[in-house]
Each structure stands twice: as structure tokens, then as C-alpha cells.
Amino acid sequence: MKAITQHAFGGPEVLVVSEVDRPTPLPTEILVRVHAAGVNPVDWKTREGKGMAGVLGEPPFILGWDVSGVVEEVGFGVTTVKPGDEVYGMPWFPRAASAYAEYVTAPSRHFALKPANISHVEAAALPLAVLTAWQALVDTAHVEAGQRVLVHAAAGGVGHFAVQIAKAKGAYVIGTASAGKHEFLRSIGVDEVVDYKTTRFEDVVSDVDVVIDLVGGDNAVRSIKTLRPGGIVVAIPSGLQEGVAEAAEAAGVRSTPFLVEPDHAALTQIAALVTAGELRVAVEAVLPLADAGKAHELGEAGHSTGKIVLSVVD
Amino acid sequence: MKAITQHAFGGPEVLVVSEVDRPTPLPTEILVRVHAAGVNPVDWKTREGKGMAGVLGEPPFILGWDVSGVVEEVGFGVTTVKPGDEVYGMPWFPRAASAYAEYVTAPSRHFALKPANISHVEAAALPLAVLTAWQALVDTAHVEAGQRVLVHAAAGGVGHFAVQIAKAKGAYVIGTASAGKHEFLRSIGVDEVVDYKTTRFEDVVSDVDVVIDLVGGDNAVRSIKTLRPGGIVVAIPSGLQEGVAEAAEAAGVRSTPFLVEPDHAALTQIAALVTAGELRVAVEAVLPLADAGKAHELGEAGHSTGKIVLSVVD
């Protein structure tokens, strides 16, 4: 099968089209014909030798964790899906990467049935970013109706899902982004927008229960000032910067770094939100699989609204 | 750390106490101090070179998939548990085995919080067997209140959990076992018992919606006669014998082999059933970790009621 492989850490040019063996599903695993593969910041960080490179080890390897496709074959003992079913998922994160390819295998519960009302391209934009938002808000912060949630980089990949999940849970959502994205933020339900370029958010936002910080730098420490006593700042994906834990403790709030895991149950609940029209996917750009390097360049240029997706089947 | 390793396929004597490196949790993983490790039939089959040996590859390896213990350390990004929490789970099944040891690592969602009202020994008897029963009945057969469920080997490891889950879901449960175990079956809620030694079950059981077959041989084909049109026979763990699929199709019923997967959401729901007193664990024997070989001999001798567990921490 065709796959994008890299044989050294480096810039987008290390990503090359290769012919590799098609994987075979072990017991409990499914073989999925990839129709589209999502691109995430962790992909290009890992490509460079950062991100999850420490987990994957030295190249050569295939990158990518976001998949939407069709079940081609099921391994022994799989009963929840059958060949022909459309699925989406996040195979093996972070232990192994495999999505930039024509076929992937993983345990059936690394996937769930794809929402029927969206395309493979849209579904491939979901798993890593939407599970990050879900697990941060629901499993980590235990967000509740009526709470105030501050989402940084609210128009980005994880951010726009965090906004919509928080709204679906009944929260009041404050989102930061540059002015050009405020209309988009309002269209996905943000109650209050802050232009981080013209306003120090901590001067105008307060009494927050949950901060989702996708920015890093000094953003987490500054966010502590917006929290109520007992509130929590969840820092994704680069972890908490130096001094955050101490600053949080001194302020009587909680803080934690957070990293996403495969989660069949959450993917199933998220699919229901998508089907009900409560969660929309913003795809910014679609490129063919062979242009994975260009997709990384586009992503690294930054300041995007929504996700970049590789189309594997036309 | 101490672990039971094997360096060749063979009888119980290949299991030896070894000193191996303590594993380190990767991002999203937890390091668990194992207090007790459950023993399952798949363990001794794999030890012999059958079972999941094809997945694990050649020895040396550590056996075992059932763990109850205490979180010792969390890897980067884990937010759902913290050091000191009691957890139970089925790390890495079937991709890698690791439970016969003082410490294991796996993604946090291969575990869930242990029910507080049972011991580590009881909790270690749960994961593989209870998830098998749960995923077969709930995720595969979609059992509903009022349905008739036939559980073969109903007093065994998987069987006694299948009985109780089916009852918790409101089903009418028929269980097969030898006469000496009928009192036990009634104590866990079986509505109708059949002595398979004196009675051909298909002569006295009919109109069944779901058959859970843990016996193999010609049991699955014979079970087809007990099903209503559209009913299902789920064959665990040795898969369907030759001719079952054809016999099922001819009879207008469904049949499938089934194999269990790690499942945080199910473990959490099962823990709630245990805490509510709706699911009891039958432990037949507890041996020290060093006696893993003896535990296998005991299990292979067969006809047990309940599970065999290795105690790792006194």
C-alpha cells in the first residue's frame, strides 16, 4: 500500500510517498481502508523529533493518528463492526502512528461508527482534537451546566470543539482569538469573545471554573487569575510551563497537563452530538495524501481556523 | 522487580520467578503496583503456545492480563487517576501480556477505579472474565430485559459473571452446570438450571434469545436448536467450530466468535454493579505469585467454580 514515511527527523521535506506492506489485523483488531487522515500540530512536532518522537523512537515511521474510513476486514473476535461499516478513530495514540496511509489496523475500540451526516474528510478532522476537548472538559474538569469556561485559541482545531462541547454541556463560554475570527466564534456558540491581541484577557475575564489552555507560554499562569477558588486550568498539549503548579497552589486553584487517549465511549457520544447537529467540524484545507509535507507547512504557518485534512481516497 | 517469565512454550514448569526491569509509564500511561493478578484459561493456553501465543510471538515473555493494584506513578498527561488510587484492569490484551509481575504499565483507560467494597484479590478476578461477559452480552448480543439467555458453563469464571450481568439487565437466565454447582447457580440468580451430564440441554431449553457458549466442541451447533428466529449464539473464547456459521444461517439465527478488548467505560459500569451488590466475584483459590505454575495446574484440572488469583502483595 501507499503511505507517507519519514526516514529522518526534519522539515516537511522528510515526508515521502513510499510503498509499504499492508498491515494485517490481529485478534480484536480491524483493518480500515483510510479515506481521509487528519493533520494535527503533534504530527509536525513529532516529524521534527519533538512531540511524541520520544514514544515512537527513531525513524523510519509513518505519521498520523486521525482516521476516517471503511472497515475492510475484522480480526478474530470483533463483533461491534463489520466490513463495509464507516468508522473514525485515533489508532494507537501515542504508542504508534499509522494514519498517513491507505490502510491502518488497531483494536476495534480505538474507533467508533462515523457520524453518517458528515464526510470522511470532516470525520478525519475530529478524533484527536475532539477527544482532547472532550477528555479535558468532561473527564478532567468535569464541566457542568452553568459553569464559566475560558477557551484559549478558541477558533483552532481543539478550541472550536472545546467551545461546542462546553456549550452542549450547558456552560457559559468565553473564547480568545484575534478579531478576524470573532464572527466564527459567535457562529459556534461562544458567549463572550476576547481579542488577545488588543486585550489582556485576565483584565476582563473572571470567576471562571475551567480554563482550556492551548497556547502555552505564560498563558497558563496568567489564566490562574481568571479562576474562581477551586477552578482548574487544563494545559494542552505542551504541558504546564514552569511555575504553573506552584502559582495554582498559591491561588487555591488546580492545574494539570493533559494528553488524549483512544476512547471508544467518547467517540460514540461525540458522534451522537454531530448527528444531532450540536457539534460542527471546521475544515480549513484538504490536500491529497502525497502532499502531506505541504499540509504540514500550511499547519505550521499557523493561525488557522479549523483543521487540515489529507484525502486518501478521492 | 519480580515477575513470572517463561523462556519456552510448555507445561507449568516453564513458569519461573525472574528479576526484570520495572517498566516506565509513557505519556497517557500509568504505572501500577500489582497487588493481585487473575489467572485465566487463555493464560495456560498461551503458555503452551496456543491461545494468544500467535500475538505475543516467541518467549521470553511475562504472562497475565488481569490486574488489581495501586497507581504508583502517572505518565505525562494522565488526569483521571493519581498515585495512591486503587485500580483494576486488563492491560494490553491481547497485544502484550504483563500481569504476573510486581508492576505493570498501560494506558490509563485500560484500567478503571476498583470497586471499594472488594479486595484486590477479588478485583483481580474480574477484568478479563467480566469484560468478556459484558461485551458478549451488552455490546454483541444487545441483551434486553425480558429476553431468555442460556449460559453454558454458568458456574465458571466467565459464566458466573454472564449470569449476573444478564440478570442485572433484566433477562431470564438458564444455566448449564453439573448438579454439584446448581446451588451456587441459584445463589447468583440463575432462574433455571440444567445438568448437562444427565440432560441434553437442547431437549429441555427453547425460545432462547442469546446463548453464551464457553464450552466449544459441538455445543454451539447444539445450542442453535434452542434459539428463537433471529437469536444469537456468541462463542467464547475458542471461536466457532466448523459448521456453526452454516448451521446458524440455515436455522435463521446468528452466530459469532468473540474476543474481549480493554474497555474503561465497561469496567466503570461493572464497578458500579459490584458496589451496588449486583455482581459478586467467586474466587476459588489464591496462591502467591511464585506459585503461578501451581495455579495453572489447578486451573487446567478444570471444573472449578469461580476464579484463581495470584497474590502479589501480602
Image (tube, coloured by chain):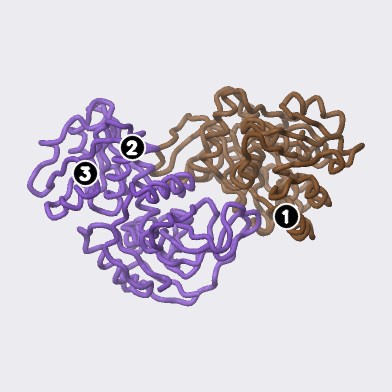
Chain colours: A purple, B brown
Query: Residue B60, image x and y in percent?
Result: 67, 54
Give above or below for B68 relative to A60. above
Which residue is tagged 1? B252
**Quadrant of the rendered image containing residue A52:** bottom left
Query: Residue B101, image x and y in percent?
Result: 62, 40
Q: What residue is shown at x 65% (from left), y 57% (from top)?
A: A76
Which sits in the foreground, A267 or B296?
A: A267
Which amino acid lies under the numbered mark 2 shown in the image of this protein? Lys
Please tell me how crowded label 1 is: few (under 14), some (14-19), or many (20+) other residues with Cα within 10 Å. some
Provide the secondary structure element on which disc 1 rests.
loop
Query: Residue A293, image x and y in percent?
Result: 32, 71
* Front of the two marks 1 and 3: 1
**Same chain letter for marks 1 and 3:** no
Q: What residue is shown at x 54% (from left), y 73% (from top)?
A: A21
**Same chain letter for marks 2 and 1:** no
Q: What residue is shown at x 27% (from left), y 30% (from top)?
A: A146
Residue B250 in the figure: left or right of residue A213:
right
Provide the secondary structure element on which disc 3 rests.
loop
Provide the secondary structure element on which disc 2 rests.
loop
Which residue is tagged 3? A190
Q: Quadrant of the C terminus of chain B?
A: top right
Residue B184 in the figure: left or right of residue A160:
right
Disc 1/disc 3 C-alpha distance (Å): 53 Å
Q: What residue is shown at x 37% (from left), y 44% (from top)?
A: A134
Which residue is tagged 2? A169
Please tell me how crowded label 2 is: few (under 14), some (14-19), or many (20+) other residues with Cα within 10 Å. some
Which amino acid lies under the numbered mark 3 shown in the image of this protein? Val
Residue B307 seen: no
Disc 2/disc 1 C-alpha distance (Å): 44 Å
Tell me the subunit letter for badge 3: A
Residue A167 seen: yes
Which sits in the foreground, B118 or A95?
A: B118
